[in-house]
Amino acid sequence: MSLYHHTQIGYVAILLLIICLSILMVLPLSNVPPLFLPIVIAAAVIMLGLFSTLTIEVTEEHLKFWFGIGLIHNRIVYTLADVFAKLGNSPHASWLAIQYFRFYCGKDQA
């Protein structure tokens, strides 16, 4: 059961990407290879799909967050969040957080 669910839409990022693509399509591209524009448009569509939104969901067991369509996502169990909250703002907080991730979550997530 979800206690909290919120999706933040990146309107500024979407608008800037649309403006950049519009300017790119209007400019004369005589010296550019023919596949340049389709590749740039495809990359922009992929970026919009991956990073246009940020969704946060809080349940009784964990905190989940993901970007766009959910390909990039993470889940933090509350005990892990409690550990980071207790670290505070010490000079070694970042180093301790990385060590904790490596020890308890594996090296892939650190």
Image: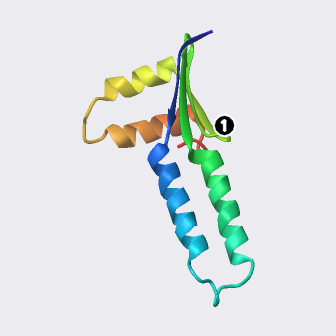
Q: Residues within 10 Å of mark 1 (few under 14, many from 20)?
A: some
Image quarter of residue 73: top right
Model colouring: rainbow
Of the pair 82 and 16, the residue shown nearer to us: 16
Q: Is residue 34 left or right of residue 67?
A: right
Percent position of residue 39, x then y = 70, 69
Amino acid on which the number 1 mark rests in the picture:
Gly
Q: Which residue is mark 1?
A: 70
Image quarter of residue 71: top right
Numbered disc total: 1
Vertical arrangement, residue 13 with respect to residue 79, above or below: below
Percent position of residue 96, x then y = 38, 37
Vertical arrangement, residue 54 with respect to residue 29, above or below: above
Of the pair 13 and 28, the residue shown nearer to us: 28
Of the pair 22 and 54, the residue shown nearer to us: 22
Percent position of residue 35, x then y = 74, 77
Rendered residue at 62%/59% (across/down): 44
Rendered residue at 68%/73% (across/down): 37
Percent position of residue 88, x then y = 28, 29
Of the pair 95 and 2, the residue shown nearer to us: 2
Q: Secondary structure at mark 1?
A: loop
